[in-house]
Image: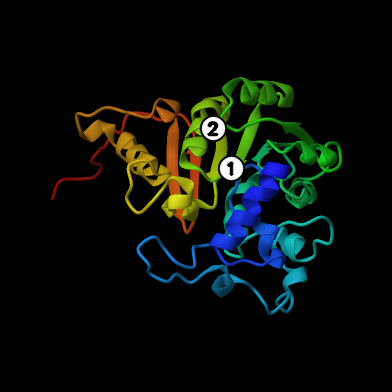
Amino acid sequence: MDLLKKISRKLMNRYQLGAENVTGVDSTSDNVLCVPVTSDSGQVGAGIESFANYDGIPAGAKDRPGLEGLFWSHDGTIVHKWHHYLPIYERYFSSFRGRKPRFLEIGVSKGGSLSLWRKYFGPDAIIFGIDIDPACDAFNGLSGQVRIGSQDDPEFLVNVVKEMGGVDIVLDDGSHYSKHIRASINTLFPLLEEGGVYMVEDLHATYWDSHEGGYQQSTSFIGDIRQMYDDMHHWYHNEGQRIKATTDTLASLHLYDSIAVLEKGRVLRPRHSQIGTAE
């Protein structure tokens, strides 16, 4: 915890943040959900202030259906979300409501997110969160089960999924480092049930030097996404499939601002036909 506090203080200095803005610190890493005020090139960026909502809860937001209403009416421990994520969650998670899904969230932080998912998926859902911060164990057994460990530890991840009895949904809100995102997918996507959803959020961090990323850098997870799309089209080129974890099982890939959604399914060789009477 002392190390995390030191890292957070360094980040506050780097990004010119005050303590009141540190609610976005992801406890699995040194990530603060912001963009640098000044880049290494000296170019001035917008900073987190330009994205902050200072207008309070939108009119009627608490009465909105589904996850949006639950988020805006939440009054428990802190849950911090970009507004445009809410309808994306609804689009891909709504079909699992009432089906007792097995839901794994990478990154527990302040615990509010697990509470939100419990309200959304219902009392019979199996909800687990993982985090490297031992302090997150305080949330174990409240809205879900919490296990302490690293998202890039394959043995730990496998054991968590075994304890869950399998996994239908993975939401990666962890360190936001590309190498950690990649490590989690390598272990968890093969364990995901057919028809399951794997969502990675806060991908804006992959463009930052602070997260070992950068624009069109080979180390960025954005490159993995491009490769996945190429792999999905391996029928039409001679390079094969290069990402083993998603080979022959990546049914679809959806991209949004800062979010990638991978849907798992059986992938069949494409076929085409012509039906009808000749002219």
Relative to 12, is 184 above or below? above
In the rendered image, which residue does mark 1 sit on?
Answer: 172
Comparing 248 with 28, the one in front is: 28
How would you rate the neighbour count of disc 2 (Cα within 10 Å): few for under 14, some for 14-19, many for 20 or more?
A: many
The residue most toward the left is 279
Q: Amino acid at mark 2?
A: Ser
Comparing 163 with 155, the one in front is: 155
Whole-percent x, y for residue 122 in the image: 80, 45
Asked if residue 80 can be seen in this view, the reply is no
Find numbered disc 2 in the image and state the secondary structure of the residue it sits on. Answer: helix
Image quadrant where one finds the N terminus: top right
Whole-percent x, y for residue 62 in the image: 77, 69
Where on the picture, by quarter, is residue 75?
bottom right
Comparing 31 with 118, the one in front is: 31
Find numbered disc 1 in the image and state the secondary structure of the residue it sits on. Answer: strand
Residue drawn at (83%, 43%), measured in percent from left and top? 143
Residue drawn at (45%, 69%), measured in percent from left and top? 45
Relative to 249, is 8 above or below? below
In the rendered image, which residue does mark 2 sit on?
Answer: 184
Whole-percent x, y for residue 134 in the image: 76, 36
Whole-percent x, y for residue 15 in the image: 55, 63
